[in-house]
Image (cartoon, helix red, strand yellow):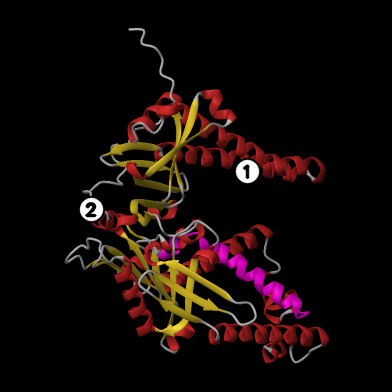
Amino acid sequence: MFLASLAVTGGDTNLQVIITLGSLFVTFLVISGIGLMRLFTTRYRLTEDRFELHTGLLFRSERSVPIGRIRGVDLTANPVHRIFGLTTLRIDSGDQSDAAARRLALDGITKAEALELRGRIIALRDAGRARPVDSDGVLSRLDWSWLRYGPLTLWGVGGVFIAAASAYRTLSELQVNPLDLGIIKDLENRFGTIPLWYGALLAAVLIVVLGMIGSTATFIENWAGYELRREDGGILRIRRGLLATRSVSIEERHLRGLELVEPIPLRWAKGAKLNAVASGLGNQEDNRRRRALTPPTPRGEALRVAAEALPTGPGLIERKGLLPHPREALRRRINRALIWSVLIAAVPVGLGLWLGSWLVITGVITGVVLVPVLVAFAFNAYHSLGHLLRGRFLVMCSGAFARRTVAHQREAIIGWKFSRTPFQRRVGLITLGATTAAGEGVYHVYDLTEGQGIALAETAVPGLLAPFIERAPDRG
């Protein structure tokens, strides 16, 4: 880093640079020392009824988890681990409590030892249970033609801004002004005379292109080597990763449903992603990290995998046949679009009253452009709404920018949550939330009439609302 700083600054250095690099070096020594101490003091034991892990020298930590409460045994290996044939084995009890309290991790054991230990833990956990026979089989493998969906995620653009901010902060700590760098000066000399609007357009195009490149690279890193397999014992195993490999296991007996996610760019390209709605995947952060069953794929492939992962017949998470929602829901979304258009346009108009009429014109043009765009999104959001009872499942669909279709087992719903905003009360609508121990914890059916919401809840899980329902007398 010292040599790199000399190269960036042209050979000049100062006390601030030395102090910054020294601080980084001391931090490296401290972190390395803590890691080595944890490695040398870690002991574990597997018995017939529990897994125990002891760590620490000055601050001892002794934790154990009953075998019967283990929900997941995952393997991850970062690039350094892979060089030395090592991996990290994580044991998760699936509780919703603090991650450090419910997860045990063995970092830096050999891959063979990790595979053997995982097999022994699963065998002890499933002892005495009925195990599916001849259930091994690959449900899906990566097709590199799916790479075309990589640039269609929005995270790459955000990554460009994050990378730029990190680089600017690092250079500032080294007392280097990024605007004084030779490459920045060269760009300024070449493009400093072009009109402002043209420069802004070029910058936007460059950011989008860099974002698409970043999204594609992220797709390759996350999904290279992807394989979804059903293994003996009723386990869905997802393996993926190029530099850092991951192996996530989901027990089919904890699978409560499926979620089909279709962000707008993917939807335009007829693509989708498939997630598991399962208990035992930890809190919301862990659940979002471990629930993915497929990468962005063609929509047909996602539906095929859904039919095999949850064998209830085809069409479970199809939108075809879903019941529409009241027209008041459409009016709510149109009103919201108009309000946001006015609020956004009002900012430059208000500034223009003090700074100049050109800002007023900009605000008016912004409002004229935003109204049809946001109203189109309002119609799209309304047409995404829908719900239906399909056999043992409650199917719910909603979302404007990212359409989400969720199929959840009705018997796994443990409660109902009714909520109404002041605007919903004014037009007689209600949002019904199905609470569950799986996935996000609650899944919503938005903008139903009060009668529809109560009838849906009572029909989906008969008797659950009985203590709270006051039936009107028969006037017949």
Q: Local crowd at mark 2 within 10 Å, few (<14), some, or many (≥20)?
A: few
Q: Local crowd at mark 1 within 10 Å, few (<14), some, or many (≥20)?
A: some
Q: Residue furthest left?
A: 134
Q: Main secondary structure of the magenta part?
A: helix
Is 395 above or below relative to 44?
above
* Location of mark 2 (residue): 311
Mark 2: secondary structure: loop
Image location of residue 139, percent across then percent down: 25, 64
In the drawing, does residue 453 fall left or right of residue 349? left
Question: What residue do we see at 61% from left, 39% from top?
Answer: 340
Question: Which three-letter amino acid code belongs to the residue tagged 1?
Answer: Thr
Q: Nearer the viewer, residue 185 or 234?
A: 234
Tell me the magenta residue range. Answer: 150-176
* Location of mark 1 (residue): 366
Mark 2 and mark 1 lie on one chain; the one further toward the N terminus is 2
Q: Is residue 200 visible?
A: yes
Question: Which three-letter amino acid code belongs to the residue tagged 2?
Answer: Pro
Q: Nearer the viewer, residue 149 or 135?
A: 135
Q: Nearer the viewer, residue 422 or 319?
A: 422
